[in-house]
């Protein structure tokens, strides 16, 4: 369009020049009229041989001017009307307005916008048919989704039996020898985890009814079950590291010792980082990092310091007896560290 407008402007400018040139040649008393008059006058004096050469030159000039006149006539035929020119300008104005309205930069982007709007108009004009098509597709997808959900549920139920069996073995390891644990699958709405969600059912003692773990287990029991579950799943998960943030809360004594032993065994296959307040667990680590906080006027800073063997003995003794460390606590700390 820009090129057409430039071409039209050029033609209009040339048109004026052609018209001016045509007037010079063809108007009354124009150049051709005067040349014809000159030719006629020379012809009347044809008896004068000295003018014959000049007459021939005038006739050659007339022939050349006729050639120029023909070229001018051709140029005059390359016309563009005022209405055609105004139509081109109006088209450009309309496009500029659309570019501004739709906030695009190029005609290509405007064309993409036009196609998008066209598709939306088509959908609106054919909304009933499109809605019917989408509903049909939705039903097909729901059937497929339902089948996939059932297939996934079958696989999970099969795997959960093995998990339950292995969990029972690990419950003994965390000092819950009589406890029972089952995975119950509850039908729910479709989600990214399928259409069945698992729930852990727990009974701490023989004869007790299986109930949701979160409702019947104590804090210490929940901590031990979580550790057992992480130990089972961690074997095949491919995780290089597991972080336990006070997973041993509510545990003490011989149970804490068993928890530490289990974490130690788990660390043979993956890195285990345990944030703990239990000396029995801390003593089982290959590395002991002391975490402390210091408060300034406007900020709190966390400090992490690796401990030497001597410093570990001191810190574990403090964990056993508090700030006033006794000789008995120091002796027990050495015993715990030597038991690795």
Image (spheres, rainbow, N blue to C red):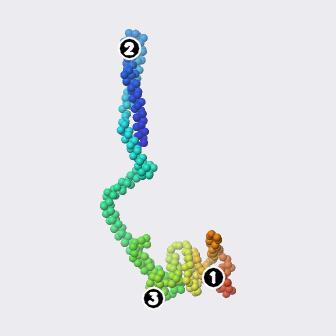
- Mark 1 and 2 residues: CB-CB less than 8 Å, in contact? no
The x and y percentages for residue 330 are 67, 84
- Lateral position of residue 167 relative to residue 261, left or right: left
Q: Residues within 10 Å of mark 3 (few under 14, many from 20)?
A: few
85 over 74 or under it: above or below: below
- Residues under labels 1 and 3: Cα distance? 36 Å
Identify the element where label 2 is drawn.
helix
Quadrant of the drawing holding the C terminus: bottom right
The residue tagged with tag 1: helix, strand or loop?
Answer: helix
Examine the rendered structure and indicate whether residue 60 appears above or below residue 106: above
Q: For residue 208, which numbered disc appears in the image? A: 3
**Whether residue 278 can be seen here:** yes
Question: Which of 270/86 is in front?
Answer: 86
Q: Quadrant of residue 157?
A: bottom left
Measure how far apart labels 1 and 2 are at the Cα level: 137 Å
Question: Residue drawn at (52%, 82%), measured in percent from left and top?
Answer: 219
Between 23 and 256, the one nearer to me in the picture: 23
- Taking depth in this image into account, of 95 and 241 the one nearest to the observer is 95
Q: Which mark is residue 319?
A: 1
Confirm whether residue 270 shows in the render. no
Q: Is residue 265 left or right of residue 47?
A: right
Q: Which residue is mark 2?
A: 41
Residue at figure coordinates x 40%, y 53% from the top left: 113
């Amino acid at each position: 369009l820009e090129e057409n407008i430039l071409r039209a402007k050029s033609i209009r400018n040339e048109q004026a020049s052609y018209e001016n040139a045509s007037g010079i040649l063809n108007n009354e008393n124009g150049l051709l009229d005067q040349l014809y008059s000159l030719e006629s006058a020379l012809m009347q004096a044809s008896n004068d041989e000295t003018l014959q050469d000049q007459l021939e030159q005038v006739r050659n000039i007339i022939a050349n001017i006729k050639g120029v006149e023909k070229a001018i006539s051709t140029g005059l035929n390359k016309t563009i009307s005022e209405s055609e020119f105004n139509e081109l300008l109006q088209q450009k104005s309309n496009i500029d307005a659309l570019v501004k309205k739709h906030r695009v930069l190029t005609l290509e982007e405007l064309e993409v916008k036009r196609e998008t709007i066209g598709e939306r108009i088509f959908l609106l004009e054919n909304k009933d048919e499109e809605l019917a098509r989408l509903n049909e597709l939705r039903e097909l997808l729901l059937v497929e989704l339902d089948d996939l959900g059932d297939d996934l549920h079958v696989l999970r139920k099969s795997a959960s039996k093995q998990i339950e069996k292995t969990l029972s073995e690990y419950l003994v390891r965390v000092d819950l020898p009589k406890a029972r644990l089952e995975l119950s699958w509850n039908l729910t709405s479709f989600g990214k985890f399928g259409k069945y969600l698992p729930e852990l059912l727990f009974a701490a003692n023989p004869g007790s009814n299986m109930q949701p773990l979160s409702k019947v287990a104590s804090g210490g029991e929940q901590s031990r079950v979580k550790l057992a579950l992480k130990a089972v799943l961690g074997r095949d998960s491919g995780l290089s590291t597991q972080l336990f943030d006070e997973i041993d809360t509510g545990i003490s004594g011989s149970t804490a010792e068993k928890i530490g032993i289990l974490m130690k065994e788990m660390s043979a296959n993956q890195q285990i980082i345990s944030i703990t307040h239990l000396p029995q667990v801390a003593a089982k680590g290959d590395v002991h990092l002391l975490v402390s906080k210091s408060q300034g006027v406007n900020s709190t800073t966390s400090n992490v310091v690796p401990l030497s063997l001597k410093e570990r003995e001191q810190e574990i003794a403090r964990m056993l007896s508090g700030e006033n460390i006794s000789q008995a606590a120091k002796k027990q700390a050495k015993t715990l560290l030597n038991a690795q």
